[in-house]
Image (tube, rainbow, N blue to C red):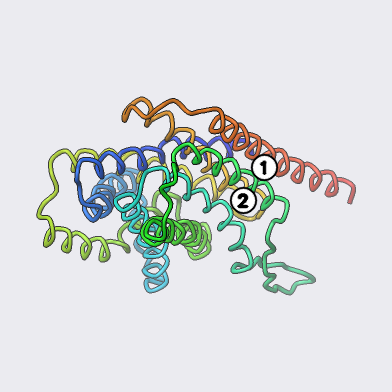
Amino acid sequence: MVKAMFIGILSSLFFAVTFILNRSMELSGGSWMWSSSLRYFFMVPFLLAIVLLKGNLVGFISEFKRAPLQWLIWSLVGFGLFYGPLTFAAASGPGWLVAGTWPITIIAGSLLAPFFFDIIENQGMKKKVRRRIPIKGLGYSSLILVGIMLIQLQHANGEFSLHLLLVGFLPILIAAIAYPLGNRKTMELCEGRIDTVQRVLGMTLFSLPLWLVIAGVGWWQVGFPSADQTIQTLIVAICSGVIATVLFFFATELVKTDQSKLAAVEATQASQVMFVIIGEMLILHEPFPNSVTTIGLCIVIVGMILHSISSRKKTLDIGRNSKAL
């Protein structure tokens, strides 16, 4: 569990690059359509090279022949409905709204549990059992969200409006639900037959039709992207699209059979807000966080620690009960 939590936090460090550079590109006038589509175009050669070097191409192709329509649907959900709305929100609203709303995904992930089933074998018979929402984990996730809200008080400055709700909050809400849903559904589809890199490559390839359409619209409206935007998107593709996504998906795969642990790993993504604040201070010269923001950061850290302790305690209790039997 500690390993999965550490990998989750490490992935959030690389994910933070997305928020920082997307904001930088928005400030320099780059189109969100190129920021989103180029990221996935750039991801393909890197992921494909890794799969080829590992000699897993044949298994990769055979897996996606099993249920191509389902892979298409959940790839478009997990990547398309995730990153498209996220970059649109970055271009339409202030940076504080994007970074502050995204951690809703840690609660969305917990609430998605009833949409999935576990296969239980009893007396030679198998049956599906609907998963339950981890109530305690949901409480810790809510605590983290309170910390995030406090962090954003420094940046709000009375800017919130109905317009920001429609073009800023709602797209991020869609992304926050789509990302864990697509991740969990594709894990369910492959049932461990392919590794994390293969799964991310498959989702990237299946989502390409959407990115081609978005890139076409972007070219029609604003022409080709600038060299600066292209370079920054390449950095986002490597750091966030390849490294962070593979790390996060791998961490969730380590604990996919335990909803409490899965919620704890997903909650580590809240730590990216801290990395974003530090990054914006160093790169975009944002002001140093005030006392309220510092309190929010402390609450986020406490919430993540409680998540980890709770999941570890549950694991130890299960182990003791097994020995007693």
274 on left or right of 47: right
Q: Which one is earlier in the sequence, the residue at label 2 or at label 1? A: 2
Determine crowd level at label 1: few under 14, some 14-19, many 20+ residues with C-alpha closer than 10 A.
many
25 on left or right of 51: left
Q: Nearer the viewer, residue 55 or 235?
A: 235
Q: Residue type at mark 2?
A: Ala
Residue at 30 percent across and 39 percent down: it is: 21
Q: Circle 2 sits on which residue?
A: 263
Q: Circle 1 sits on which residue?
A: 307
Residue at 48 percent across and 28 percent down: it is: 289
- Return the residue found at the far front: 158
Residue 264 location, x and y as percent?
Answer: 62, 46
Q: Quadrant of the N terminus?
A: top right
- Kindly state the secondary structure of the residue where label 1 is placed: helix
Q: Is residue 321 positioned above or below 71 on the image?
A: above
Residue 234 location, x and y as percent?
Answer: 24, 41
Residue 63 location, x and y as percent?
Answer: 41, 64
Q: Is residue 312 positioned above or below 280 on the image?
A: below
